[in-house]
Amino acid sequence: MANIKDIAKQAGVGIGTVSRVINNSGYVKKETREKVEKVVKEMKYLPNEIARSMTSQRNNIVAFILPNSTHLFFGELLYHVEEELFKSGYKVMLCNSSEKIEKEIVYLDMLKNNRVDAVILLTNNDVEQYLDKNLPILSFDRRFKDIPFVSSDNYQGGIIAAKKLIEKGCKNFMFIGDDAQGDNTPVWTEVTKRRKGFIEYLDAQKHANVVNIEYPLGDYFIGADEIYEMIKGYPNVDGIFTVSDAVAYSAIQALAKMGKRVPQDVKVIGFDGGRSFLNLGEKITSISQSPELIAKAMSEIIINYYTKQKIESKVIPVSLSEGETI
């Protein structure tokens, strides 16, 4: 396998010049840089990442802290984040927190101890006191003071869902989600805006018949039997918006247990994008967020940390993905 000395000899330059080209540090004339890069490619040179990290004080590793990577949308987002960051020379370390704050603190300490270069954090826990805000931290779907975040336009998603259910003739509405948090609670996520957009739009349109169903925060895989117990007392509901497609799936099963047909009797809209839904047999109508655009926004913020460019939070547009449940 070629090493840096071999590259220098083949290109007819010094080892220091090759090092500056590979590490993108210091001045190298354009024609010299191009010559070295050509030799690097021809000799299929792979830099020693450990040695590089010792000299640059960087590992080119980004830790992505997720509650649960088996969640359909989180898994898809992880894929696109890894793809985007790899293009810029970063590797992604997956950290499944399982919603446990002690695990999140351990992963955040890795950033403080220079074991990773940046952290993308998705959490429902109250971890603000554990964040070193002088370090490269990016939050997804959650606001922390002085830390950039990326999220979908959750509020607009709620509005779109409400408009579509009204358009389809619904009169009695329900929101099912785990994010019914007050503004003064210590944990506040952007996901809350799905409910707020939905209910506030219905209120503005003088639709008073709106039921808000809550369950414990962070319960991503709530089952049909649990949903059934929550909604069985509302037989007149004919339009349901849920916090996620996973919850929509359980709601549809619960409605079947009540003898309700979807979409003939009750129309259902989820949130995430209505992607492949396993054994349901029909595509869920859903507010679609774009994991590709979210990943690009995350990658740009991470890169901007190290190129000293302006860092701004980003809100990504959503759209309606029509399926068979309305």
Image (cartoon, grey):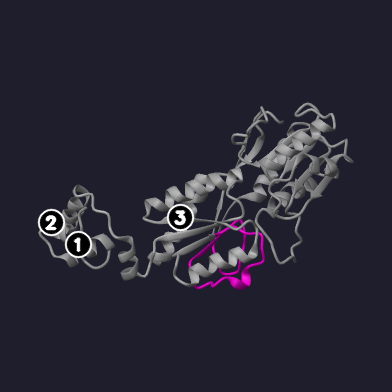
The answer to if 4 sits in the magenta stretch is no
Q: Residues within 10 Å of mark 3 (few under 14, many from 20)?
A: many
Depth check: 248 or 108 in front?
108
* Residue identifier under label 2: 11
Q: Position of residue 86 (x, y in %)?
A: 40, 51
Query: In the shown orientation, is residue 129 left or right of residue 242?
Result: left
Residue that lies at the very extreme toward the left in this rendered image: 12
**Label 1 SS:** helix
Dominant secondary structure (helix, strand or loop) of the stretch shown in magenta: loop
- Spatial separation of the CA atoms under disc 2 and disc 3: 33 Å
Vertical order, 34 against 271 (above or below): below
* Residue identifier under label 1: 18
Q: Residue at x 64, y 50 (%)?
A: 154
Type of amino acid under label 1: Val
> What span is colored magenta in the figure?
121-148
* Residue identifier under label 3: 92
Type of amino acid under label 2: Ala
> Marks 3 and 2: in contact by CB < 8 Å?
no
Vertical order, 277 against 179 (above or below): above
